[in-house]
Amino acid sequence: TAARASRVMREESQRLQAAIDAIRHAYIAQQQGQPLRSEPSVARKLDEIAAATRKTESALATFQSRRDHAGRSLPNAAAVSVASAEEQPALALGTQPGDLAPQLATEDFIRALNFPETAEDQAGFNALRRALKDRSASQLIQAAQDVLTLLSQDGIYMDDLRPDRARPEVWRQFAQGARGRTIAPLGGIRDRSSLALSNARMKQDPIFRDAAHHFLRRFDKTFAAFEKTASDGEISALADTRTARAFMLLGRCAGTFD
């Protein structure tokens, strides 16, 4: 019934908010100088947010299908079969519940890639929540959080890096497949300590290496899609995010710009 679907969505919304609150606590701990490992894993909390979001979307898809069967068709709504709130609804032509989520705004995407500025950055957390409903953005965000967490173990924080800025046309060349010296300006991280530590970790730590390469692949794929419709200003804004700085740093370690 509609009441049951509404109740499920309300419960999942509460779980989503709890996960967001846990991330705030992790940010507070970091700001107070406490080791992150003493707090719940921020990466795990991001996974919980994504899972809660998927369950909410599943319940919403079921609710919409029931309204559709009741004769209240939604404009351009996908034909979906009735499923319980605990199951993934079967959608037309293999559509997944996440495909029903509204298109992610470019501003939210860019803001989410920078992650919230502080524990009180409500706008940042709202953008993060919306981005995690988008499959591609969610995959990149979680890959970025993995490498940012690993880098922080060596005292490497993106806020401390001041990379040289590359022109939007160089970023566009990267999106369109250019590699090596053609896109060398993208490797604008000059901090020797961060580069040395990251290079050593890449060679010696297989977990770090796998996480870094996975992140670089996700960034490559997601940015290639983003560039097709992005303005130069939007590309410059994305290039200034913490996620982009991680790409610049790890890209240099992986030889992307050589």
Image: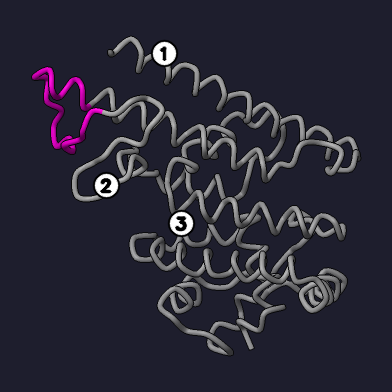
Range of the magenta residues?
Answer: 65-82
Residue 156 vs residue 5, the one in the foreground: 5
- Residue 100 in the image: above or below residue 21: below
| Residue annotated with mark 1 | 7
Q: Earlier in the sequence, mark 3 or mark 2?
A: 2
Q: Quadrant of the N terminus?
A: top left
Residue 240 vs residue 149, the one in the foreground: 149
Q: Marks 1/2: CA distance?
A: 24 Å
Q: Marks 3/2: CA distance?
A: 30 Å
- Residue 146 in the image: above or below residue 186: above
Q: Which amino acid lies under the numbered mark 1 shown in the image of this protein?
A: Arg
Classified by dominant secondary structure, the portion drawn in magenta counts as loop
Label disc, if present, on residue 246 of the rendered structure: none
Which residue is pictured at 59% across the width and 34% down the height? 125
In screen coordinates, is 35 left or right of 13? right
Q: Which amino acid lies under the numbered mark 2 shown in the image of this protein?
A: Thr
Q: Quadrant of the C terminus?
A: bottom right
Which residue is pictured at 29% across the width and 30% down the height? 61
In screen coordinates, is 92 left or right of 120? left
| Residue annotated with mark 3 | 234
Image coordinates for residue 135, horizontal then vertical, percent: 43, 49
| Residue annotated with mark 2 | 95
Q: Secondary structure at mark 1?
A: helix
Q: Earlier in the sequence, mark 3 or mark 1?
A: 1
